[in-house]
Image (cartoon, grey):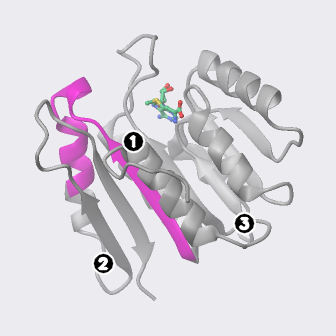
Amino acid sequence: MKKVKYGKLVEFVHMLIEQSCCGNQALNFIDATCGNGFDTLFLCRAAGENGHVLAFDIQEQAIERTKMLLKSNLNFVNYEAIKDSHEFISKYLTSGSGIDAVIFNLGYLPFSDKAVSTKGDVTVKSVQNLLPFLNPDGRIYITTYIAHDTGDEIKIIYSYLSSLDKSKYNVLHVNLINKENTPPELFIIEKNA
Ligand SMILES: C[S@@+](CC[C@H](N)C(=O)[O-])C[C@H]1O[C@@H](n2cnc3c(N)ncnc32)[C@H](O)[C@@H]1O
């Protein structure tokens, strides 16, 4: 069995995606904030050769870092890395492109300009635009950090997600309750039926 620390939310998200998609073919995944490409690499492997992954970031250096990581670690190409903001992802989708999982790993690109960071209102717009494309068993995973903007982004996301129609969606909020220094928090959105 693979060793996973649930408290490391990135590992936890990957484990949940692996478990929920296990054995399925031709999966469609989205990395809404590809950064250094680690989540994209995970999604490409989980989707397999017949699956497809779209990865987005607003920074050219993130797109380049992601492409380099994928080229040196995959022997197939099942991805596109696109320099655009995640609020416009639906431009790259067709009505037939049902999504199985989306990862948002928010904040800023490590070892880079911290001012270029995700914004709560933009993240909310992206989620609103992605929900119609979610497959019946699809999920959106949003890992949020408080430190980079003293919690504004998380408040905006929490407020929007807690208002989602309960008859259509389940929204989970995962917190590490015994950690100091504002640990990350995870939101998961799935369709109810
Ligand atoms: C914490 S990093 C992502 C880490 C990444 N998933 C990985 O595995 O390395 C957050 C990224 O979000 C990107 N970002 C900020 N605003 C964005 C937006 N509106 N659309 C897409 N990406 C955005 C930043 O440029 C940064 O690279």
Front one among 148 and 95: 148
Q: Quadrant of the N terminus?
A: bottom right
Q: Which mark is residue 165?
A: 2
Q: Quadrant of residue 61?
A: top right
The residue that mark 3 highlights is: 97
Q: Which element is circle 2 on?
A: loop
Mark 3 or 2, nearer chain start: 3
The type of residue carrying mark 2 is: Asp
Query: Where does residue 157 sit, x and y in percent of width and height?
Result: 27, 51
Q: Are marks 3 and 1 in contact (CB under 8 Å)?
A: no
Rounded to the nearest angstrom, the CA distance separating label 2 from label 1 is 20 Å
Residue labelled 1 has its Cβ within 8 Å of some atom of ligand 1 = yes
The residue that mark 1 highlights is: 122
Q: Which element is circle 1 on?
A: helix
Residue 151 is one of the magenta-drawn residues: yes
Query: Would residue 120 be found to the left or right of residue 108 on screen?
Result: left
Magenta span = 137-158
Query: Would residue 65 be found to the left or right of residue 193 on screen?
Result: right
Rounded to the nearest angstrom, the CA distance separating label 3 from label 1 is 22 Å
The type of residue carrying mark 3 is: Ser
Dot 3: few (<14), some (14–19), or many (≥20) neighbours within 10 Å?
A: few
> Residue shown at 31%/47% (left/top)?
7
The type of residue carrying mark 1 is: Val
> Residue shown at 33%/57% (left/top)?
187
